[in-house]
Amino acid sequence: MATYTVTINERTNAGRQLLNYLLGLGLIKDKVTERKRTGLEEAEEDIRNGRVYTASGAADLFNQLMKD
């Protein structure tokens, strides 16, 4: 059995109908969508991973940048 990747535009009527048809036949096990992360999600990940820095002012920020 082969595995195929097909991109369907769900914004069009034909795309929605095709997707519903394939789901109805049981040919699609799970709807897989690649969703781009929002800026907030990326920021939360940065916080969790410790990639957040603080500076007391502009001069301190520039000093930190020059060290790295």
Image: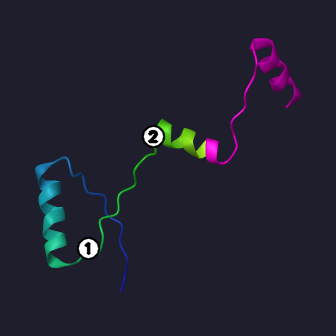
Query: Please, what is the three-letter code of the amino acid marked with disc 2?
Result: Thr
Where residue 60 appears, x then y in whole percent?
81, 18
Q: Characterize the local packing of mark 2: few (<14), some (14-19) or many (20 or more) Cα atoms within 10 angstroms.
A: few
- Give the numbered dot on residue 42: none
Q: Give the Cα distance between marks 1 and 2.
A: 27 Å
Q: Quadrant of the C terminus?
A: top right
- Give the numbered dot on residue 28: 1
Q: Which one is in front in this view, the residue at disc 1 or the one at disc 2?
A: 2
Where residue 18 appears, x then y in whole percent?
15, 63
Q: Residue at x 19, y 63 (%)?
A: 19
Magenta segment boundaries in residue numbering: 47-68
Q: Is residue 56 above or below residue 13?
A: above
Q: Nearer the viewer, residue 45 or 8?
A: 45
Q: Is residue 64 above or below residue 40?
A: above
Q: Quadrant of the N terminus?
A: bottom left
Where residue 51 appears, x then y in whole percent?
69, 40
Q: Which residue in the structure is indicated by mark 2?
A: 38
Q: Secondary structure at mark 2?
A: loop
Q: Nearer the viewer, residue 34 or 48?
A: 48
Quadrant of the rendered structure where residue 58 is?
top right
Q: Residue at x 73, y 27 (%)?
A: 54
